[in-house]
Image: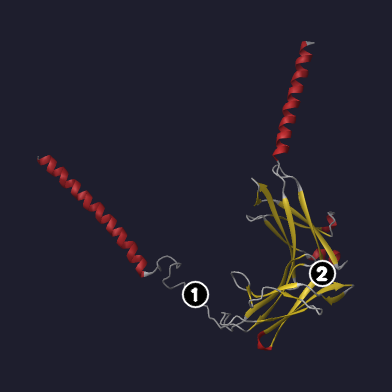
């Protein structure tokens, strides 16, 4: 009887410890916030971008290393699976919409996507979705450095101009897009058109002075992120000269500026000169001490 009681008590204690450990693990899990964005670049490349964040000490922080699964049509069945990605150091994951989704994509003018993050040891499961209406932008250039862009959406298999869409018209640069003028955004009229004027003089282009102009709608509630590009020879022809064999601050080894090398070597000589002088003086003091 006593043995049976001891076994029962041991089982109860083990169950309590296991439950407490499970409860502590479950309580330690954080909520993961996921957001999904749709991009259509130049009416050709379409992709999804997901952001992952969590709240730490009242502030949102990005979460890298999270595995995300993407689906089309809001259906998480295997037939609508697009692929999976792992978030980078900035908490972002980018997935190009594959060609295998073409059949599902063509079913409707309105399409939806979903991203799912399965539960892990650190975070609860999370998901996000986005619904967009298929749209595109046509951009063109006119005389006197004028730019036009037309926004169209798909309605009953017909591309129809859209009124009231805010567009940015800019020049593609390495450090970020530069607006073509002081106007930040343009709103499409009843014909879905906007007109902009290029006011950036003496802007460096390629060897022929060609710049890339872009018209884009960002984070639109209906269409997502859509953009279109066109080249225009409105810049200053610029030939790229590689500084590889020139003496510059950012050059390769052995090609630093002469003044910088002189400064560095002078400091080295001065430091070693002082050390040698001190060493000589110490030897002299020792000799004086021995002779005394």
How many other residues sit within 10 Å of disc 1, few (<14), some (14-19) or many (≥20)? few
Instruction: Residue 146: name its quadrant.
Output: bottom right
Residue 31 location, x and y as percent? 72, 46
Residue 201 percent location from the top left of the image: 58, 82
* 91, 95: nearer the viewer: 91
Residue name at image x 52 percent, y 78 percent: 240
Task: Identify the residue at image location x=26%, y=52%.
Answer: 275
Which one is in front, 13 or 161? 161
Q: Quadrant of the N terminus?
A: top right
Residue at far bottom of view: 143
Q: Regarding mark 2 in the picture, which secondary structure is present there?
A: loop
Residue that extends furthest to the right in the rendered view of this protein: 156
Residue in the foreground of this view, choosing between 238 and 235: 235
Q: Which sits in the foreground, 189 or 177? A: 189
Residue 208 lies left or right of residue 228; in this view the side is left
Residue wearing tag 2: 134
- Helix or strand or loop: what does disc 1 sit on? loop
> Is 173 drawn above or below residue 51 in the view shown?
below
**Above or below, comparing residue 153 to residue 18 in the picture:** below
Q: Earlier in the sequence, mark 2 or mark 1?
A: 2
Label 2 – label 1 distance at C-alpha: 44 Å
Tell us which disc is closer to us: 2 or 1. 2
> Can you say whether 101 is above or below 1 in the image?
below
As drawn, the residue found furthest toward the top would be 1
Model colouring: secondary structure
| Quadrant hosting residue 101 | bottom right
Which residue occupies the extreme left position in the image?
A: 292
User: Which quarter of the rendered picture does the C terminus lie within?
Assistant: top left
Query: Residue at horizontal 29%, vertical 55%?
Result: 271
Residue 40 is situated, as x and y percent measured from the top left of the image, at: 75, 69
Please tell me the numbered disc located at residue 242.
Answer: 1
């Amino acid at each position: 009887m006593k043995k049976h009681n001891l076994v029962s008590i041991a089982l109860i204690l083990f169950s309590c410890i296991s439950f407490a450990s499970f409860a502590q693990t479950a309580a330690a899990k954080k909520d993961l916030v996921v957001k999904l964005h749709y991009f259509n670049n130049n009416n050709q490349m379409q992709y999804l971008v997901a952001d992952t964040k969590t709240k730490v000490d009242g502030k949102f922080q990005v979460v890298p290393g999270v595995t995300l699964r993407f689906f089309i049509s809001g259906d998480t069945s295997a037939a609508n699976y697009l692929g999976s990605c792992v978030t980078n150091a900035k908490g972002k994951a980018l997935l190009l919409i594959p060609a295998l989704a073409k059949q599902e994509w063509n079913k409707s003018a309105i399409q939806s996507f979903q991203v799912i993050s399965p539960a892990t040891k650190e975070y609860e499961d999370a998901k996000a979705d986005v619904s967009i209406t298929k749209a595109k932008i046509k951009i063109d250039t006119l005389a006197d450095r004028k730019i036009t862009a037309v926004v169209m959406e798909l309605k009953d298999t017909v591309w129809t101009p859209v009124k009231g869409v805010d567009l940015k018209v800019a020049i593609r640069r390495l450090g970020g897009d530069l607006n073509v003028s002081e106007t930040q955004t343009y709103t499409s009229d009843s014909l879905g058109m906007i007109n902009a004027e290029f006011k950036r003089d003496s802007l460096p282009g390629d060897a022929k002075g060609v710049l890339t102009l872009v018209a884009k709608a960002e984070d639109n509630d209906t269409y997502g992120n859509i953009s279109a590009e066109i080249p225009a020879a409105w810049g200053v022809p610029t030939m790229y000269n590689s500084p590889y064999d020139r003496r510059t601050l950012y050059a390769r080894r052995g090609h630093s500026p002469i003044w910088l090398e002189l400064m560095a070597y002078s400091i080295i000589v001065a430091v070693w000169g002082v050390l040698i002088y001190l060493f000589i003086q110490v030897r002299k003091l020792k000799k004086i001490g021995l002779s005394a």
